[in-house]
């Protein structure tokens, strides 16, 4: 039976487990193990040895702690053999437990430029990376903004520096264009380019106007990255992490595999005014 939960279905390894062609056990490692560990954490199981790293946590390593917690979960289910191995029946039970989203983030897209990465791909990537943690990304609206000749000249290149709070300048003017949205939703603006050539996106916005801005040549994961900046907020640290498997790695747009978040990042995101419980 195919997996249906957004938490697990993007993992090829877990889909193999669901078809009884693989198992997760002591010695296994990778994103599939990380997703199982995150699910167990959300069920209330403590995993102090597998968590705590600011860059990649839980660690995705199927050690003795993970085996012990899997056995606890299996025993509590009363229908599974408590052997500490995630096999077909265990993943199907987890898939059933997490068959619904727990949180929702609504995005409104406003465009003054075409993007190199197709829109449907960057949106799907955003849905996937947050869906791993039960957070539903909703496409709330889309709008192509017509600019006056003066506005076209002004916004051809965004010259302002990217800061957390942008209550004036070009970003402020740009993020005021288009139809207004609730302060609990996030505006995503697509622009041509920034004056700083290495800058592909900016999560800064005016107070009570959650928004991010993304350059046309941004990578496939950049929308998810900048949306995450908005959700994490200015007070969360570290802003960027050195582990390239994490969505908030500084060069994440060029990732070729599905990135992850830490348990601390997920906990912070769930407290954002833009992340509503379902």
Image (spheres, rainbow, N blue to C red):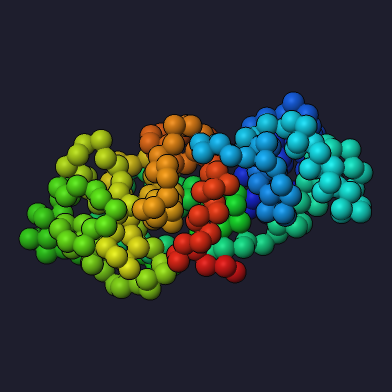
**Which x, y percent locates residue 247?**
47, 41
Residue 65 visible in the current orientation: yes
User: As drawn, which residue projects farthest toward the left?
Assistant: 150
Q: Is residue 241 above or below residue 172?
A: above
Instruction: Please state the total of marks drawn on the protein image.
Output: 0
Of residues 56 and 98, the one drawn nearer to the viewer in this rendering: 56
Residue 277 position by quadrant: bottom right
Q: Residue at x 42, y 50 (%)?
A: 236
Q: Is residue 53 left or right of residue 2?
A: left
Q: Position of residue 4 (x, y in %)?
A: 69, 54
Answer above or below: position of 108 versus 39.
below
Left or right of residue 124: residue 158 = left
Image quadrant holding the C terminus, namely bottom right
- The reply to whether residue 120 is visible in this rendering is no
* Residue ID at (44%, 32%): 242
Image location of residue 259, percent across then percent down: 52, 39
Above or below, 32 relative to 141: above
Residue in view at x 25 percent, y 50 percent: 163
Residue 233: where, in percent of width, then height? 39, 55
């Amino acid at each position: 039976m195919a997996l249906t939960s957004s938490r697990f279905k993007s993992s090829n390894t877990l889909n193999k487990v669901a078809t009884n062609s693989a198992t997760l056990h002591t010695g296994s490692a990778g994103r599939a193990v990380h997703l199982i560990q995150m699910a167990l954490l959300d069920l209330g199981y403590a995993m102090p040895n597998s968590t705590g790293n600011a860059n990649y946590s839980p660690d995705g390593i199927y050690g003795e702690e993970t085996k012990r917690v899997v056995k606890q979960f299996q025993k509590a289910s009363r229908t599974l053999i408590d052997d500490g191995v995630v096999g077909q029946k265990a993943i199907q039970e987890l898939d059933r437990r997490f068959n619904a989203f727990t949180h929702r983030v609504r995005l409104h897209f406003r465009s003054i430029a075409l993007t190199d990465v197709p829109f449907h791909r960057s949106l799907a990537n955003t849905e996937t990376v947050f869906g791993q943690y039960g957070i539903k990304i909703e496409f709330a609206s889309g709008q192509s903004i017509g600019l006056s000749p003066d506005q076209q000249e002004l916004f051809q290149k965004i010259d302002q520096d990217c800061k957390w709070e942008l209550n004036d300048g070009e970003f402020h003017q740009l993020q005021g264009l288009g139809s207004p949205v609730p302060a609990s939703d996030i505006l995503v603006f697509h622009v041509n380019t920034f004056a700083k050539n290495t800058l592909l996106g900016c999560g800064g916005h005016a107070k009570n106007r959650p928004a991010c801005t993304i350059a046309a040549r941004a990578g496939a994961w950049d929308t998810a990255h900048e949306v995450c900046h908005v959700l994490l907020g200015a007070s969360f640290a570290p802003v960027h992490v050195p582990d390239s498997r994490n969505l908030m790695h500084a060069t994440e747009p060029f990732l070729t595999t599905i990135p992850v978040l830490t348990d601390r990042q997920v906990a912070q995101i769930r407290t954002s005014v833009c992340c509503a419980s379902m």
